[in-house]
Image: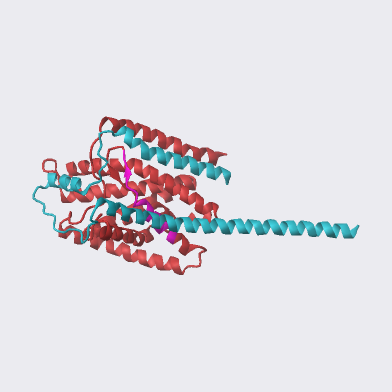
Amino acid sequence: MKKVFKKHMVPKVSTIIGLSSLLFFALYPRDAYAMHIMEGMLPPKWCIFWFAVSAPFFIYGLYRMKKIVTSTTQNAKIMLALCGAFVFVLSSLKLPSVTGSCSHPTGVGLGTVMFGPGVMSVLGVIILLFQALLLAHGGLTTLGANCFSMTIVGPFVGFAVYKICRAFKVNRSVSLFLCAVLADWSTYVTTSFQLAVVFPDPTNGVGGAVIKFLSIYAITQIPLAIAEGFLTVIVYNLVISNNLWKESALG
Amino acid sequence: MKKKTKQNLIMLLIVLVLVITPFFVAKGGSFAGSDDEGTAQIKKNDPHYKVWAHPLWTPPSAEIESLLFTVQGSLGTGVIAYILGSAHGRKKERERQIHAQNEAGKAHTETSAANGR
């Protein structure tokens, strides 16, 4: 009974948050862009820096992936495909946001909870490459930086959130919801910082630029992150109810 | 199971509301996610920055771009739907088998009971 009550609280709480933020944006509509960092928009030395930072995580991800593929866990490979496909779908959906601009969710929450944060760096790179090569969205030179925000910071933050929630005995659906929301949101917060460090505000320095970029990226992302949270829980529910994955395997 | 389905539908509805409300809230917005605007924002902070790399290939038109985005989305959806669909079928089949076994078992005990009398 208690569990049911809690589950129904999630929509309620988020509706309240959603409505109050809607009111805020109704007063301040603005045009903004909120996407990955575009091709050539980071100086070469920063590109190299982010590649260097992301590379170890990618290698760790490959190692984790090999372990999963060779493991005897039932449906492990199938679920890995499903998690990858989920990222594929969600990152193709450019959704409108209350700020009057569009952005897209990341979809890394599901895989993070099922397989841990490492694997997502491999799945994420595939998607980022697809978008950079075929859609001129994101870029090859900025791949390292985009990887860092979407496939490393996002999943690791989400994973930490999930673990903390579970430690406090929050039920799985709610923990997963929060994991997905914050993984999505922290991705764009990271992007804001990445840009602000390179392009400080002429008058207010890096701090001013952080605020400016956050107001563009992070605020646009709030409703999308919440939507992503719900979509993640829906797919998770379907996975569990069709016996594809044991609920207890999630921790 | 029924409760879960209801829960899923409610969540789907909330997602729809979240996606639709922006059109009513931010009426003045252009709903662009445009690269040009991004460049403009960075140019504002650093007017001397030179974009030093360009995409190897750019979709020739907005139609082609949306085609490719749709391909990306539908590929993913196809995989997810296949996996969930086949799992659902397997589950239904298993339930049917268990049901049939129970029926057979019941019939067996009934006949043996009748024989015993």
Chain letter corresponding to the colour cyan: B
Q: Which residues are magenta?
A: A81-97
Q: Position of residue A88 (x, y in %)?
A: 37, 56
The chain letter corresponding to red is A
Q: Is residue B14 above or below residue B51?
A: above
Q: Position of residue B23 (x, y in %)?
A: 32, 36
From the viewer's perspective, is A146 left or right of B88? left
Determine the residue located farthest toward the right in the rendered image.
Answer: B117
Which residue is located at x 49 percent, y 45 percent? A171
Q: Is residue A39 visible?
A: yes
Residue B47 percent across, percent down from the top left: 9, 47
Q: How is the image coloured?
A: by chain
Q: Which one is nearer the viewer's eye here, A236 or A178?
A: A236
Let me know if residue A85 is in the magenta part.
yes
Q: Quadrant of residue A39?
A: bottom left
Instruction: From this view, report whether residue A97 is shown above or below residue A194.
Output: above
Q: Residue at x 23, y 39 (%)?
A: A31
Which residue is depicted at the point 31% across and 40% down? A97
Q: Is residue A245 visible?
A: no
